Image: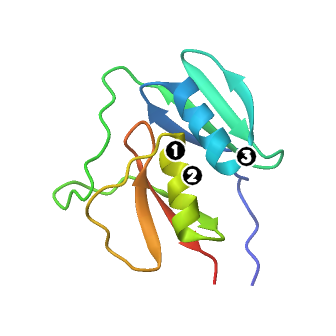
Amino acid sequence: MTATPTATLAMVSLDCADPARQAAFYHEVLGWEITHSQDEYAMVSDGTTSIGFGRVEGYRPPAWPDTGAAKRYHLDLYVDDLDEAERRCVAAGAGRPDFQPGETWRVLTDPAGQPFCICVKS
């Protein structure tokens, strides 16, 4: 049975301290165009999907791993080569936490400290 949608996804918006830096990072990692960049808000898009970054005063990134706090969100990104993708993400400004829970993916943190995963598409 197909459900009748109530809404469609417009975009994903993520809180951060430096929207322009976030947009530049994801532009480098995803190759998406920076479609908007101001102090308070920035956005990247592939022409179909967009990710926005909004400034939040006092923003504090989640700790990884933080088993005592509720999980927020993370992005999973497909890559062709895990080691090469990690190298390029780190060169673009990502961090690599010591704790890595799996062998077929890597947890990295974006410049705002928000975790994301790189995974080989199988």
Answer left or right for 25 relative to 37.
Answer: left
Amino acid under label 2? Arg
Instruction: Count residues near mark 3 (Cα–Cα under 10 Å), then give few for <14, some for 14-19, many for 20+.
Output: few
Q: Earlier in the sequence, mark 3 or mark 2?
A: 3
Horizontal and vertical percent position of residue 31: 73, 46
Horizontal and vertical percent position of residue 43: 66, 32
CB-based contact (under 8 Å), mark 3 and mark 1: no
Marks 1 and 2 sit apart, C-alpha to C-alpha, by 5 Å
SS at badge 1: helix
Image quadrant where one finds the N terminus: bottom right
Amino acid under label 1? Ala
Which residue does the numbered mark 2 point to in the structure image?
Answer: 88
Instruction: Count residues near mark 1 (Cα–Cα under 10 Å), then give few for <14, some for 14-19, many for 20+.
Output: few
Residue ID at (61%, 32%) = 24
Q: Earlier in the sequence, mark 3 or mark 1?
A: 3
Which residue does the numbered mark 1 point to in the structure image?
Answer: 91
